[in-house]
């Protein structure tokens, strides 16, 4: 599948999203920053990537945390996974949060997240008086024990 990518801020080039290994399911996204940003513990900030994507209809981009940043620095994605809809053409931003105990500095070109392109389906809803029964029924959080 081909996805068209538009770069912003041509005077401040950033790497295109890219798969870092042959078997990777997500492409790394890079920070596009004029000045470095430091996330204090508990702070969240929208970090620009400098790119927009034309994701084909029937697909979405799922923005997810990078596992290395999560385990080493406590950096996550607040709304992870975030969704990039197929009709969105604006710059992709990543809402990062510092769950760690130390400040974390993001510089231009830092790999900040990954994006996975996934197929999606739009459902047709029909209102009914009763739903088909299941063994679980309305059992919610923790209903099967710990």
Image: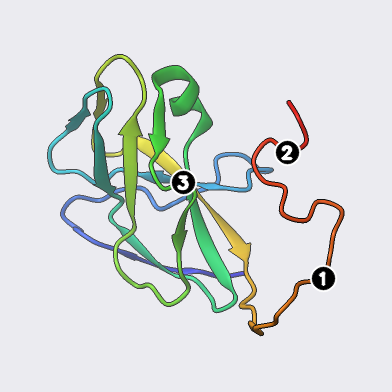
Is residue 97 shown left or right of residue 123? left
Circle 3: element type: loop
Q: CA distance from mark 2 to mark 3?
A: 25 Å
Q: Residue furthest top?
A: 101
The quarter of the picture where residue 88 lies is bottom left
What residue sits right under mark 3 in the picture?
Answer: 80
Which residue corresponds to the image point at 66% horizontal and 43% vertical from the top-left? 22
Q: CA distance from mark 1 to mark 2?
A: 19 Å
- In depth, the one of 64 and 131 nearer the eye is 131
Which residue corresponds to the image point at 74% horizontal and 75% vertical from the top-left? 130
The quarter of the picture where residue 141 lies is top right
Q: Residue furthest right?
A: 135
Instruction: Residue 87: give x, y in percent of width and height.
Output: 42, 77
Disc 1 packing (10 Å; few <14; some 14–19; many ≥20): few
Q: Residue furthest front?
A: 129
Quarter holding the C terminus? Answer: top right
Tag 1 and tag 2, C-beta contact below 8 Å: no
Q: Is residue 51 above or below residue 2?
A: above
Is label 2 or label 3 in front?
Answer: 2
Q: Which mark is residue 132?
A: 1
What residue sits right under mark 2 in the picture?
Answer: 143
Circle 2: element type: loop
- In depth, the one of 81 and 72 nearer the eye is 81
Instruction: Residue 124: give x, y in percent of width and height.
Output: 64, 83
Instruction: Residue 57: give x, y in percent of width and height.
Output: 55, 79
- In depth, the one of 90 and 142 nearer the eye is 142
Is label 3 or label 1 in front?
Answer: 1
Is residue 117 shown left or right of residue 86? right
Q: CA distance from mark 3 to mark 1?
A: 31 Å
């Amino acid at each position: 599948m081909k996805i068209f990518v538009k770069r912003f801020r041509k005077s401040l080039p950033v790497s295109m999203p890219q798969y870092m290994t042959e078997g990777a399911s997500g492409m790394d996204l890079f920070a596009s920053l004029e000045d470095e940003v430091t996330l204090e513990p508990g702070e969240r900030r929208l970090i620009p990537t400098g790119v927009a994507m034309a994701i084909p209809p029937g697909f979405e981009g799922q923005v997810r945390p990078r596992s290395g940043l999560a385990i080493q620095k406590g950096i996550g994605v607040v709304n992870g996974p975030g969704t990039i809809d197929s009709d969105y053409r604006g710059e992709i931003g990543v809402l990062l949060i510092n769950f760690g105990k130390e400040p974390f500095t993001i510089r231009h070109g830092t790999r900040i997240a990954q994006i996975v392109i996934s197929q999606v389906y739009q459902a047709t809803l029909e209102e009914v008086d009763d739903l088909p029964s299941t063994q679980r029924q309305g059992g919610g959080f923790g209903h099967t024990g710990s």
